[in-house]
Image: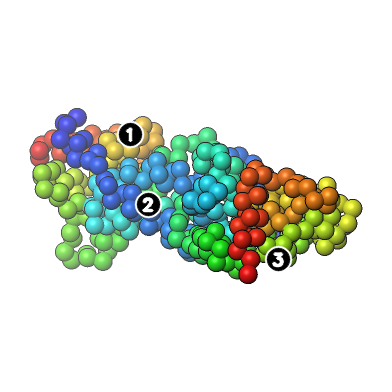
Amino acid sequence: MNDPLARALRAPAPEARAAARRFADRAAAEHEADLAYTTTPSPLGELLLVASPRGLAQMHYLDEPLELALETLARKRSPRIVESASALDPWRRELDEYFRGDRRRFEAQLDWEAMAPFQSAVLRATVAIPYGETSTYTGVATVAGNARAQRAAGNALGANPLAIIIPCHRVLRSGGGFGGYTGGLHRKHYLLELEALSRP
Amino acid sequence: MASRTGRPARSSTVTHSLPPFQDLLERHSEDVWRTLRAMVGAQAAEDCFQETFLAALRAYPRLRADSSPRAWLLTIAHNKAIDHIRRGARERAQEIEPAGAEPPAPDGEIWSAVAGLAPRQRAAVALRYIGDLSHREIAAAIGCSEEASRRSLHDGLETLRRQL
């Protein structure tokens, strides 16, 4: 095969990268993709944000490699996932404001769809805990409809798919103990401190 | 099998595991672009590229996990390019403009020679030299017998050799 032809055909196509980005942004904006994701820095480390057409579906501390997190998402929710920073703008903005101490309540839409009924009830009870205040595992279990299910409530909080935004860091142990936190206790401590300092 | 409830199947019921679509986009977008550039020219490549990945995203859950996503994507790209060429031929039935590449300066001659090939030959050359597809995959992409795709490739290269 004559080389000039192969060279011309295989010449680099730097336009492809921008075209791919345009595609992903549009696929997310027009809800062609089931999920859109981006990563964003925060005072607590890099965060992974994932939105479905219904709203923010997941937000995690990105302590594992991104590829692993995406593979899990593809397996558990949908492989039709694209990267789009603009699709996650509303939540990123609110998070930035929160970390600056300028936001006490998250307003952008959340996706509750993938949650089991009791988990959803526990997490909704958690969302109702006001900024800067705390509750207990028994407290949220009670609001969720089963006062004796502290253990299940703890599991539901541990599996919170929307860290920070569903403020599971505001749930402490009844005796006044700190309880656990999936992202690590230093983060729970940081968030409670931030809210205590930013309280009006 | 059709869903009993008539609702689209929940994605969580998918049992095989496909990589995140973003992987395919990052891994193969340059070759998709190159293939389209060879088949329809740089100008039309953008639209065909968007159509290719949109069709791929929609069909993605039905892709078998053991098949080659690369051959699959290039097949879709080929189909979009052929659609574009046919549309162009219909719309400009009078002054048929070869749907080929605008020549980037140094290789101008090559690009106009490629653009002058019959669409099937152009496809065979692009899928072989850009996509690195096997003769069987090329035949499947073009939708013809393996023998016919070998012939298209051979004839295409012959024509190019004569011209360059």
Q: Label 3 lies in what chain?
A: A
Three-letter code for the amino acid on which mark 1 is drawn: Asp
Q: Label 1 lies in what chain?
A: B
Q: Label 2 lies in what chain?
A: A
Residue beneath the point at 33% across and 34% down: B132
Q: What element carries label 3?
A: loop
C-beta proximity under 8 Å, tags 2 and 1: no
Three-letter code for the amino acid on which mark 2 is drawn: Ala
Q: Is mark 1 on a helix, strand or loop?
A: loop
A46 vs B117, left or right, is: right
Task: Out of A149 and B12, give the one closest to the viewer.
Answer: A149
Residue A130: which numbered mark, if any? 3
In percent of width and height, residue B56 lies at 45, 50
Packing grade of label 3 (10 A; few <14, some 14-19, many >=20) is: few
Residue B107 visible in rendering = yes
Task: Out of B92 and B46, give the one closest to the viewer.
Answer: B46
Residue furthest right as drawn: A148
- Viewer-side label of 2, 1: 2
Residue beneath the point at 23% across and 52% down: B41
Residue A153 visible in rendering = no
Residue B132: which numbered mark, if any? 1
Residue furthest top as drawn: A1
Q: How far apart are marks 2 and 1 (CA)?
A: 21 Å
Residue under label 2, please give it.
A20
A158 vs B126, left or right, is: right
Residue beneath the point at 39% across and 33% down: B136
For residue A76, which quarter of the picture?
top right
Task: Out of A13 and B160, give the one closest to the viewer.
Answer: A13
Task: Out of B36 and B118, give the one closest to the viewer.
Answer: B36
In percent of width and height, residue A26 lies at 43, 61
Three-letter code for the amino acid on which mark 3 is drawn: Pro
Q: How far apart are marks 2 and 3 (CA)?
A: 42 Å
